[in-house]
Amino acid sequence: MKNYDILIIGGGPAGISAALAASKFNLKVALFEEKETLGGQLVKQTHKFFGSKDESAGTRGIFIAQKLINDVNNKDNIDVYLNSMVLGYYEDGVVTALVKGKMEKFKPKKIVIATGAFEKSLPFENNDLPGVFGAGAVQTLMNVYGVLPGKEVLMVGSGNIGLIVSYQLAQAGVKVKGIVEISEKIGGYLVHASKVRRLGIPIYTKHTITKAIGENKVEGAIIENIETKEKKQISCDVICLATGLMPLSDIINQINCEMKYISELGGYVPVHDDNMKTTVENIFVAGDTAGIEEATAAMLEGELAGLYASYELTNIFDNRINEIKERLKEFRKTSSKVVSGLKKLNLYNDFTVNSQEDLGKLHRTGIPEKESIESNIPKENKRFAIIECYQKIPCNPCVSSCPTNAISMDSLNGIPKLDTNKCIGCGNCVAICPGLAIFVVDKESVLLPYEFLPLPNKGDIVEVVDREGKFLEKNIVLNVRKMKDKTNLIEVKVSKEHINNARHIRVVK
Ligand code: SF4
Ligand code: SF4
């Protein structure tokens, strides 16, 4: 039997953050991960994270994972058990686990459960045909194993996962035929939606998939407008489902923690307090297991659970506990769904969410309204940034990237505002923005963020396209700035008539 102060189940962002927090108190920590590496979903997140500088905003998930894993490996008081699955918890506090195929017993004083989530499926005709994938599986295939799932993909679901995976598929050279969304509005961040629209990918709101076509494998799909009942056939060899996540709660159930069904949090979640303590003594939860949210919230919750469990063992209260609670509130300020779920757990009772205004066409299509686009164009005839970020989301790295303080926001969830008098058109904000929502426009050129290969060279002729990926003109690349974090900057010459619509380029093969 091995004794530990804190045993953590799950080596994703929440579990690692809990382990690092507890390690600060010189406690003996065991971190269990059933896969061969730590990092969980972060290891396949090739996109940049939102949030603020403190939460690594503007950094790709994969690099956040590397840093967290290095930090864990540098701690002598964290024992990492890879390829190891926790199997059971007994009334005497003993935990059994299969460690590399061998059963072992552990006796921890506290347990943090951060087992994450699994993907929800969707009922439709032929949904068991080979070629129907979950979005997480597609990300694992592409970004972990370097394998393409197919050649033509229909994405179902326009939440952040559906939008991000569509973009990553396009980066990998796969044709995304469309994104199907049953709601009237796009579910994910609208900057992600605008990114995929620039690639020419349509988003079919108010649509659902009714059938996968094919005998032995997917050869197409039928989608249907839920109002008009009009059907459309789309040829594809992959149907990718990004229809939501459900907390993975097997071990929590087995421990007999009180559970509650809260649809806003993804399904059955453990009842817990604002220190992430469940109804069973010494058992904490964190991350998607406690309710589905973004990875940043998972890391904050993990740290909170680790710090509070440590406080109960050491009696040393770290003020970071209160700081994290405030950060989580800031992050949830525009998340009405999550906050409504938390209220059902008797948390956040007096908390008011900032209302999200309906952004009209942008919410339905990913393309901003004409008036929004025009309001961004200043009267002065000079080089300046255009910020096409109109939705309240927890994000602000553009503000601190600006050397002249030309960008301001009233809070983390505010809308960035540009002072054109201060802007010198340097492009720093273009490079850092995780939503790829900033461009620098000059009299006869546009500076764009570009995350595709091959990169064009200075002097090459490329196709300049608009916000829907429609061809505008061919023109010459004036400059290529290769950036360390791989959001490269391309400055392309654009004729005056297209300057306010040129938002992406296609390299001519
Ligand atoms: S282009 Fe440069 S100066 Fe202008 S807003 Fe962006 S970072 Fe600031
Ligand atoms: S414009 Fe600013 S607030 Fe909007 S996504 Fe980009 S960095 Fe975030």
Image (tube, rainbow, N blue to C red):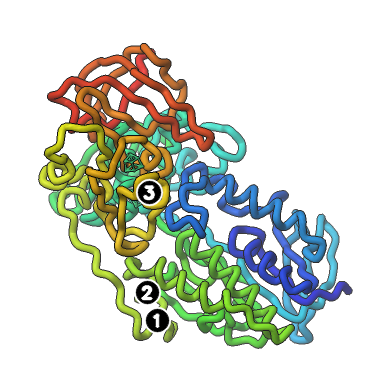
Which one is earlier in the sequence, the residue at label 3 or at label 1? 1
Kind of residue indicated by mark 3: Cys
* 257 shown above or below 330: below
From this view, report whether residue 68 is shown above or below residue 355.
Answer: above
**Image quadrant where residue 24 sits:** bottom right
Q: Which mark is residue 411?
A: none
Residues tagged 3 and 1 counted as in contact (Cβ below 8 A): no
Relative placement, left or right, of 492 versus 96 is left
* Disc 1 + disc 2, Cβ < 8 Å: yes
Q: Can residue 185 be seen here?
A: yes
Residue 232, position as x, y percentages in the image: 22, 38
Q: Residues within 10 Å of mark 2 (few under 14, many from 20)?
A: many
Task: State the residue position of label 1.
Answer: 348
Q: Which mark is residue 339?
A: 2
Secondary structure type for disc 3: helix
- The quadrant of the rendered image in which ligand 1 is seen is top left
Q: Name the residue type under label 1.
A: Tyr
Expressed as whole percent of the image width and height from the top left, the position of residue 433 reads: 39, 44
User: Is 403 on the left or on the right of 269, as rendered?
Assistant: left
Kind of residue at badge 2:
Val
Residue receiving disc 3: 398
Quadrant containing the C terminus in the rendered view: top left
Sequence-wise, the earlier of marks 1 and 2 is 2
305 with respect to 392 (left or right): right
